[in-house]
Image (cartoon, rainbow, N blue to C red):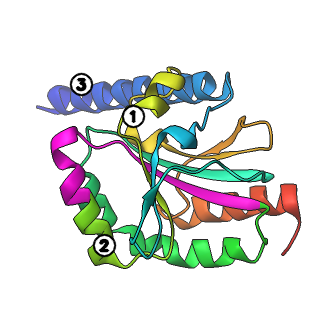
């Protein structure tokens, strides 16, 4: 009995180490190439939702990218976007030096429900809908692990931080340290 428990603990530790090694390799691969943000080929939904438009990105020093691929429920995620309001509000004090890009790539049959979810959420941020999967095809080095689909880019579109600042306090502290390290205090 004790031997079985010991074997189970060893198996869990080995699996944990293997998973950690896999994540480390995914982050290294993600940081190995700049991330292409081809926003002109995506539909931008503004907070008022009166217009769906294509628009080009204005230059900035840092970019926060939150990417939701077709394996996740986009309209479900919209319901949790209120958690970004505090961070978005703080980012606005940097007066355009840092911008947020919420990129959704829903399955074609889920686009209408995504649009309805965004309209119902009354978001104070823009959302980009990637209807042609240009983001994933332009960035084949993106990991499949959705936990690694939130990252901070520098002015050269290189990844400088991976992880969501809304997930935990340590990540949020690291996010703000990185932002302030590049831009100073607002």
Q: Is residue 85 left or right of residue 153?
A: left
Which residues are drawn in magenta?
98-114
Quadrant where the N terminus is found in the figure: top left
Tell me the quarter of the picture where residue 172 sits. Answer: bottom right
Q: Residue 16: x, y in percent?
A: 39, 31
The CA span between labels 2 and 3 is 52 Å
Residue drawn at point x = 62 percent, y = 78 percent:
89
* 96 to 62, vertically: above or below: below
Residue drawn at point x = 85 percent, y = 55 percent:
182
Inspect the magenta stretch and tell me whether residue 103 lies in it: yes
Comes first in the chain, label 1 or label 2: 2
Residue on which the image places disc 2:
119
The CA span between labels 3 and 1 is 28 Å
Q: Residue 165: x, y in percent?
A: 56, 61
Residue on which the image places disc 1:
145
What element does badge 3 sit on? helix
Comes first in the chain, label 2 or label 3: 3
Q: Residues within 10 Å of mark 1 (few under 14, many from 20)?
A: few
Residue drawn at point x = 28 percent, y = 33 percent:
9
Tell me the quarter of the picture where residue 147 sits. Answer: top left
Q: Is residue 167 left or right of residue 77?
A: right
Q: Residue furthest right?
A: 184
Q: Is residue 87 left or right of residue 66?
A: right
């Amino acid at each position: 009995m004790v031997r079985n428990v010991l074997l189970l603990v060893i198996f869990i530790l080995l699996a944990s180490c293997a998973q950690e090694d896999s994540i480390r390799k995914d982050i290294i691969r993600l940081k190995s190439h700049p991330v292409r943000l081809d926003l002109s080929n995506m539909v931008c939904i503004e907070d008022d939702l009166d217009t769906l438009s294509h628009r080009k990105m204005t230059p900035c020093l840092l970019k926060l990218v939150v990417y939701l691929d077709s394996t996740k429920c986009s309209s479900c995620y919209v319901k949790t976007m209120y958690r970004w309001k505090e961070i978005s509000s703080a980012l606005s004090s940097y007066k355009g030096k840092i911008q947020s890009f919420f990129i959704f790539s829903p399955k074609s049959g889920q686009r209408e429900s995504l649009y309805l979810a965004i309209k119902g959420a009354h978001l104070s941020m823009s959302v980009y809908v990637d209807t042609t999967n240009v983001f994933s095809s332009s960035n084949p080095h993106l990991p499949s692990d959705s936990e690694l689909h939130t990252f901070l880019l520098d002015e050269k579109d290189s990844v400088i931080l991976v992880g969501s600042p809304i997930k935990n306090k340590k990540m949020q502290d690291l996010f703000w340290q990185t932002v302030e390290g590049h831009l100073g205090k607002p």
